[in-house]
C-alpha cells in the first residue's frame, strides 16, 4: 500500500512537471487572432463535379459562407496515401517519400521524410487530433507527434465511426488543429464507380457526417473561432483513380471561418492554382507556424479579407 502511494505521488509529480512544461511553451502568434482552431476535413475520392451535383446542404452553406475552388489539384499520382501525405506535409511525394498506397509494406514503421502539420503544431504547444477511416494513415502517426488519434487497427472503418469519434474528440479537447478523413465515398467509388448513383447517394450521406463535425464545434463552443477546410485527396473514373487523368486530379477546396471571404470563387484569380500542398501551408500560416523553406505549397492568402 505504501509502495503504491509512493508510486502515485511520483506519478503525480511527473504529471505536474509535464503540465508545467506544457504551460511554459509560448503559443505562436497567429496572424488572424480570431482563428483559434483549424479543422481539415478530407472526403476521400470526392470529385468536384459530383459534389456540385449532390444535395449537400452543409457543404452548400460552406460555399455561401466561404471561399472555394472546384479546380484545386492533388498530387500527380492521385492516390490516397501519397496525396494525403502531401496535403499534411506541404510537399510533393518525391520529397516526403510516401509513394506507396497500402498498409505499411515494411516490418519497421515508416514515416514521411518531413513532419506533418500536426507534428509541427504539437511541437508549438497546440493540442492536435487525427481521426481517419483507413489504418494506413498510421504512417502519419509517428509516436508523440499528435495528441489525440483515432484510426482503425486494420483496413477501413466507416464515415460513421470517423464522425462519432471526431465529434467526441472535438467536444472533449477542443484541439487547435484537427485532421479528419472520411473513407466511404472512395470505397463506394471502387465498388460501384465514380459517377454512379450509389456513389452520389454516399456523397449526400457524407454531408450529414460533415454536419456532425459542425455540430460538435457548436457544442464545444468553438465554431465561431474555427477555420474549416473541406477538401479531398483525389477524384476518380470507372472503378479507380490514377495518374494523368483530370477526373482523378481535381479536388474541391472550400474554406470557412472568421475573416474568410464570403461566397468567393478563387478562379477569379487567373494566376492562382490551389494545390493540395497549400492545405498544409495555409494551416501553418493560420496557426502562426513558420513556412518551411522546403514547402511546395503556399498559404492561399486570397481566401482571406485581410491577408498579406
Ligand atoms: Zn481509392
Image: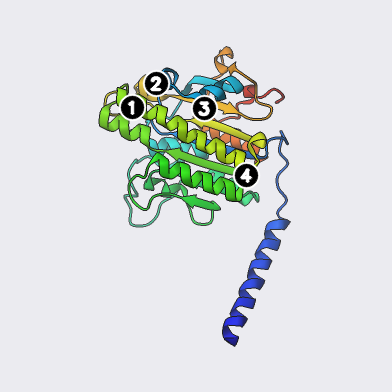
Look at the numbered disc 1 and give the secondary structure of its residue.
helix
Look at the numbered disc 2 and give the secondary structure of its residue.
helix
Q: Position of residue 139 (x, y in %)?
A: 42, 48
Q: CA distance from mark 3 to mark 2?
A: 15 Å
Mark 1 or 3: in front is: 3
In the rendered image, which residue does mark 1 sit on?
A: 199
Callout 1: few (<14), some (14-19), or many (20+) C-alpha neighbours within 10 Å? many
Up the image or down, 99 lies above or below 297; here it is below
In the rendered image, which residue does mark 3 sit on?
A: 58
Q: Earlier in the sequence, mark 3 or mark 2?
A: 2
Q: Nearer the viewer, residue 198 or 245?
A: 198
The answer to whether the residues at label 1 and label 2 have Cβ atoms under 8 Å apart is yes
- 8 vs 134, left or right, is right
Q: Earlier in the sequence, mark 1 or mark 2?
A: 2
- 257 vs 50, left or right, is right
Q: Earlier in the sequence, mark 1 or mark 3?
A: 3
Q: Earlier in the sequence, mark 4 or mark 2?
A: 2
Residue in the image at 53% along x and 48% along y? 168
Callout 2: few (<14), some (14-19), or many (20+) C-alpha neighbours within 10 Å? some
User: Does the beta carbon at disc 2 come under 8 Å from ligand 1?
Assistant: no
Mark 4 or 1: in front is: 1
Q: CA distance from mark 1 to mark 2?
A: 9 Å
Q: Position of residue 147 (x, y in %)?
A: 56, 53
Amino acid at each position: 500500500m505504501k509502495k503504491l502511494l509512493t508510486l502515485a505521488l511520483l506519478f503525480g509529480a511527473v504529471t505536474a512537471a509535464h503540465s508545467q512544461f506544457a504551460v511554459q511553451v509560448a503559443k505562436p502568434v497567429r496572424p488572424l487572432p480570431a482563428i483559434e482552431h483549424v479543422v481539415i476535413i478530407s472526403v476521400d475520392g470526392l470529385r468536384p463535379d459530383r459534389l456540385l451535383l449532390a444535395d449537400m446542404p452543409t457543404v452548400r452553406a460552406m460555399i455561401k459562407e466561404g471561399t472555394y475552388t472546384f479546380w484545386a489539384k492533388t498530387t500527380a499520382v492521385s492516390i490516397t496515401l501519397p496525396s494525403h501525405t502531401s496535403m499534411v506535409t506541404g510537399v510533393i511525394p518525391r520529397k516526403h517519400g510516401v509513394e506507396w498506397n497500402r498498409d505499411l509494406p515494411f516490418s519497421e514503421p515508416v514515416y514521411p521524410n518531413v513532419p506533418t502539420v500536426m507534428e509541427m503544431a504539437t511541437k508549438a504547444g497546440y493540442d492536435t487530433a487525427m481521426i481517419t477511416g483507413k489504418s494506413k494513415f498510421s504512417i502519419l502517426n509517428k509516436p508523440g507527434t499528435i495528441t489525440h488519434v483515432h484510426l482503425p487497427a486494420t483496413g477501413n472503418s466507416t464515415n460513421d465511426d470517423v464522425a462519432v469519434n471526431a465529434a467526441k474528440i472535438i467536444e472533449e479537447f477542443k484541439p487547435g488543429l484537427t485532421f479528419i478523413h472520411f473513407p466511404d465515398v472512395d470505397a463506394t467509388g471502387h465498388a460501384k464507380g465514380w459517377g454512379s448513383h450509389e456513389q452520389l447517394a454516399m456523397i449526400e450521406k457524407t454531408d450529414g457526417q460533415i454536419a456532425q463535425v459542425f455540430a460538435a464545434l457548436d457544442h464545444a463552443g468553438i465554431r465561431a473561432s474555427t477555420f474549416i477546410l473541406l477538401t479531398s485527396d483525389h477524384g476518380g473514373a470507372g472503378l479507380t483513380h490514377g495518374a494523368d487523368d483530370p477526373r482523378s486530379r481535381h479536388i474541391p477546396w472550400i474554406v470557412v471561418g472568421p475573416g474568410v471571404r464570403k461566397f468567393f470563387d478563387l478562379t477569379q484569380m487567373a494566376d492562382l492554382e490551389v494545390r493540395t500542398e497549400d492545405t498544409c501551408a495555409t494551416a501553418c500560416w493560420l496557426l502562426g507556424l513558420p513556412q518551411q523553406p522546403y514547402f511546395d505549397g503556399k498559404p492561399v492568402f486570397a481566401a482571406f479579407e485581410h491577408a498579406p
